[in-house]
Image (cartoon, grey):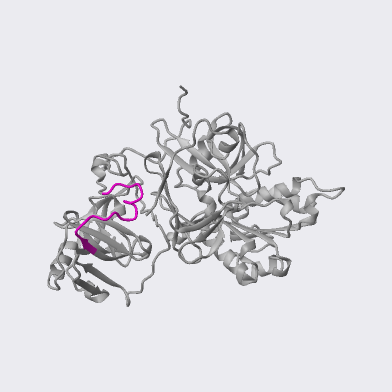
């Protein structure tokens, strides 16, 4: 049995080498209520090296007796945005999310490290078409991808996004639980190459014409591009949902290597 | 020297309470029963399930599910303590004591040795001294809270050794192997304490 | 709810692995020492047990990596991985 004990990095190592490792103290610049149970933290992060859409940060809280709790949160903002945004869903029995939703306020500092993750990332240069499937708070890293797609500079007179058609299928319990409602509606209305489909699994508002059930094979077959188009697919949300959707997409003929997943665990947050 | 950063207003889950005296150092009480698994839940059908006691020199005592069910069972109420700091008080279990298993196995020539290695479906192992599974200190449990032990909590049968940190209570137990020499199990060989007494807070290797 | 509902992708280990490896390893490719399947580290299955991360091959479920942090030391067991190619 060989195990390796690795120490923390040498104090003298080059700053660029330590950039991905260092814990930083971010400052909360603003908070935005997204839904009754979620809000977005806008952060100023000193020395932030930039990030790619889809990456996450690790957040660490420390109590005055030294007790620590650590959780990962996907970055909601595009690489082009001036501030780092984290959208946090409040879990009633969570340890960290109630603090981030109820206690943390503008001016407070928050310890985090990142950006982390080179696997679940997308940028316009990777091309498309782009299929994004979100379950609940799983929409957060996918929103970063859509924001990047809308903001990325293109060539000549054509915005980058015209070369990359995109579709988002977003499952939530109720309309009031949907993050970024106004922004998604506005983005889809302004951009003919972006389609957003919602499915509400618990309750729909009167006059609802969207889907009204859990994501299933029929819905995916309807929303996804044909496998021959070889879309880049990103699926994010609670683990059981992600596994079911990814398996169904592969059954429908999509290349497993093109279906990237980000499982959030049992409930999609903590 | 800068002060370490403290998150304003963060207190975490720990709460002192009426039961504080029953909690080993560093633990907090939880009403839940967290599921922490190192792998996918094994799903051995009862028709193919068996349990073995294996002596160091070879003899094996084997029980199929219905044979195991015919052994004397007892009900116990115990506190359990996980090294990740949660404790659950007054948990109710039903199972066969390791003492009863050893008595039944003696008839088949299985003799105990100073050390025990517990082996589970999925490859998990944990090691204990013989003295810590005998004398009424350990059971092979098949029921929790009055109902058959659920797969996510280690069913159909798990080891229950409440006086040590709960990683020693191996889920999906299939075999207790007696050994002349101690052999570190899955976590004991990877930074965790070889013995694991919560009252002396023996969490990690090197803890006194 | 069982252990499978709790599992995560290899990305979840990205933070702690960044304490050992300077380049990001979640996009690196690893070969399972047990079955030979090769894939991106981000596609491995992470079981975050609280005691440590047990990372398994999505093809055969064998343990590919273990990560634990007892006493602020970082323990890394790579015996389940045949080779890692960091792009």
Residue A37 visible in rendering = no
Residue shown at the point (13%, 56%) measured from the top left: B135
Instruction: Give the percent coordinates (x, y) of residue B65.
Output: 27, 74
* Magenta segment includes B19: no
B52 or B179, which lies in front? B179
Name the magenta segment's main secondary structure.
loop
Is the residue A106 above or below the residue B35 in the image? Answer: above
Horizontal side of residue B157 vs A88, given as left or right = left
**Quadrant position of residue A39:** top right
Magenta span: B177-194
**Direction top: furthest residue:** B1
Residue shown at the point (66%, 49%) measured from the top left: A143
Instruction: Give the percent coordinates (x, y) of residue A4.
Output: 42, 47
Residue shown at the point (52%, 57%) measured from the top left: C83
* Magenta segment includes B179: yes
Horizontal side of residue B208 vs A193, given as left or right = left
Residue B208 visible in rendering = yes
**Direction right: furthest residue:** A157
Horizontal side of residue C70 vs A43, given as left or right = left
């Amino acid at each position: 049995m060989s195990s390796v004990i690795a120490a923390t990095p040498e104090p003298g190592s080059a700053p660029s080498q330590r950039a991905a490792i260092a814990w930083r103290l971010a400052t909360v610049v603003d908070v935005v209520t997204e839904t009754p149970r979620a809000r977005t933290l806008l952060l100023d992060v000193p020395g932030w090296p930039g990030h790619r859409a889809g990456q996450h940060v690790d957040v660490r809280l420390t109590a005055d007796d030294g007790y620590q709790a650590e959780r990962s949160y996907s970055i909601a903002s595009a690489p082009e945005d001036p501030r780092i945004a984290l959208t946090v869903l409040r879990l009633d029995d969570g340890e960290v999310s109630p603090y981030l939703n109820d206690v943390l306020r503008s001016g407070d500092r928050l310890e985090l490290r990142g950006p982390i993750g080179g696997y679940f990332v997308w940028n316009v240069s990777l091309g498309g078409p782009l299929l994004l499937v979100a379950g609940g708070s799983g929409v957060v890293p996918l929103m970063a991808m859509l924001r990047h797609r809308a903001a990325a500079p293109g060539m000549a007179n054509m915005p980058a996004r015209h070369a990359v058609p995109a579709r988002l299928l977003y499952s939530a319990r109720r309309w009031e639980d949907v993050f970024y409602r106004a922004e998604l509606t506005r983005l889809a209305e302004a951009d003919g190459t972006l389609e957003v489909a919602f499915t509400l699994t618990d309750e729909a508002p009167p006059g609802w014409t969207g889907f009204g059930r859990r994501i299933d094979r029929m819905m995916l077959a309807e929303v996804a591009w044909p496998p021959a188009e070889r879309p880049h697919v990103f699926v994010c949300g609670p683990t059981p949902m992600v596994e079911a959707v990814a398996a169904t997409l592969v059954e429908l003929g999509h290349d497993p290597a093109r279906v990237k997943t980000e499982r959030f665990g049992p409930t999609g947050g903590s | 020297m800068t002060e370490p950063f403290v998150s304003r207003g963060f207190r975490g889950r720990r709460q002192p309470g009426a039961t504080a005296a029953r909690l080993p150092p560093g633990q907090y009480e939880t009403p839940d029963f967290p599921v922490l698994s190192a792998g996918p839940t094994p799903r051995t059908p009862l028709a193919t399930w068996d349990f073995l006691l294996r002596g160091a020199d070879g003899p094996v005592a084997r029980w199929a599910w219905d044979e195991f069910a015919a052994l004397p069972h007892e009900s116990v109420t115990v506190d359990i303590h996980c090294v990740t700091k949660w404790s659950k008080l007054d948990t109710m279990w039903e199972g066969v004591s390791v003492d009863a298993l050893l008595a039944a196995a003696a008839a088949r020539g299985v003799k105990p040795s100073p050390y025990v290695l517990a082996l589970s479906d999925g490859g998990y192992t944990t090691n204990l001294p013989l003295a810590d599974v005998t004398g009424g200190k350990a059971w092979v449990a098949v029921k929790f809270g009055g109902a058959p032990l659920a797969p996510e909590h280690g069913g159909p049968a798990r080891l229950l050794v409440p006086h040590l940190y709960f990683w020693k209570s191996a889920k999906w137990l299939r075999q207790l192997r007696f050994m002349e020499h101690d052999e570190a199990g899955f976590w004991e060989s990877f930074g965790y304490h070889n013995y694991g007494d919560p009252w002396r807070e023996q969490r990690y290797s090197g803890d006194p | 709810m069982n252990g499978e509902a709790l599992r995560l992708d290899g990305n979840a280990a990205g933070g702690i692995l960044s304490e050992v490896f300077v380049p990001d390893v979640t996009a690196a490719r690893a070969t399972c020492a047990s079955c030979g399947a090769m894939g991106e580290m981000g596609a491995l299955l992470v079981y975050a047990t609280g005691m440590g991360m047990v990372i398994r091959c999505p093809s055969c479920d064998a343990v590919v990596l273990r990560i634990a942090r007892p006493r602020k030391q970082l323990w890394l067991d790579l015996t389940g991985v045949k080779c890692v190619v960091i792009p």
